[in-house]
Amino acid sequence: METGPYYFVKNLPLHELITHEFINTFVKKGSCCALTYNTNIDEDNTAALLPNGKLILSLDKDTYEETGLQGHPSRYSGRKIMKFIVSIDLMDLSCNLDSKKYKRISWSFKEKKPLKFDFLLAWHHTGAEESAMMSYFSSYRIQEHQPKIAVSTMTDLQCPVLQSSELGGKPEVACGARELLDWLGAVFSDVELNNEPNNFISTYCCPQPSTVVAKAYLCTITGFILPEKICLLLEQLCRYFDEPKLAPWVTLSVQGFADSPVSWREKEHGFRKGGEHLYNFVIFNNQDYWLQMAVGANDDCPP
C-alpha cells in the first residue's frame, strides 16, 4: 500500500515555513509535517512542524539570544542552561500578518538570524496533487522519496502466549504487556531467543508461557510517515481478523525520530542515552487491543 511520498529539501531557510503562501497552501489544508534532518537534539539547533500548525524550535543559547524570540529553557539542559525551546503557532500567526509579532518573527528568520536546515517534509490532503510540494519548493534542491518496505518471514518463532484480559500477565497462563514489549524489541533486532550457554552476545530468552509459531511475518516501513498513513495501517490490521485466522494477535509498532524536539503532544523530547519514544498496538483476534507507550529518561510520561 502507499505510505508516501515524503520529501528531502536541502538548505531550506526557516522563514519559508512561516510565509503566508506556505501556511495557506499546506498547513491550513490537510496535514503537514517537517523535521530537521541529520541534526542532534542535544547538540544542534533543530526544528519540527507539527500537523496542528505548531513550529517547535530547539535552539542553543547563542542562537536563541540572537533570534530575539520568546521561549523557555530546555528541561534537560542541566544546571547550566544551554538549550532553549521556542513554540510558534502558525495558525494563529497567519490570522494577522500585519501584527508586530509576525513582523518580528519574520525579521528574525530573514535578517537578524537566518537559519537554514536540511528538512524532511510530508503533506497529506485528500484530493490534492502529490507533486504540489515538489512544485512549491522547485527553487531548492528537493528530492521525493518513498518509504522503504522490507518484508521477512520467520519460521519456528518462539512467541509469548497472550490473553487480552491479562494485561499484567498471569503465571503459567499468559505473559504481560511489558514482557511482550521486550520480546518485540528482540525480534525487531534479530536477537536469538534461546539463551544458549555459548551465546555471549545475548542471554535473552522468550518469556514464559510461550508457543512456537510455524510462520510469522515482519514488515518494516522506514521513512517520514504521517499520522494519517499510520491510522490507515492500523485500520487494515484491525480488518485482518474480519475472517477467522489462526493468528491470535498482530502488532503495529511506531518508532519516533530519536532527535525530534518533541515526542507526545508538543512535550519536549531529549536524547539522554538513546532518544527512545515509541508506541505499540496489539490487536487481538477478538478485536480487543492493547496500546503501549514508552519513552526514554529525557521525556515526560506519555498521555
Image: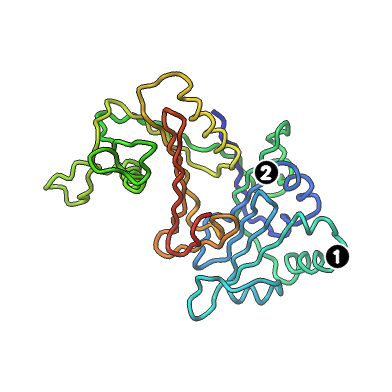
* Residue 75, numbered circle: none
Percent position of residue 168, x then y: 35, 46
Task: Look at mark 1 in the image and give the residue it sits on.
Answer: 99
Q: Residue furthest top?
A: 243
- Mark 1 secondary-structure assignment: loop
Report if residue 192 is visible in the image.
Answer: no
Residue sitting nearer the eye, 188 or 12: 188
Kind of residue at badge 1: Ser
Q: Residue furthest right?
A: 98
Q: Is residue 237 left or right of residue 123?
A: left
Q: Residue at x 65, y 67 (%)?
A: 86
Percent of width and height locating residue 63: 63, 73
The location of residue 142, given as percent across then percent down, is 64, 45
Mark sitting earlier along the chain (2/1): 2
Neighbourhood count class around disc 2 (C-alpha, 10 Å): few under 14, some 14–19, many 20 upward = some
Which mark is on residue 31? Answer: 2
The kind of residue tagged 2 is: Ser
Residue at x-position 36% and y-position 31%: 152
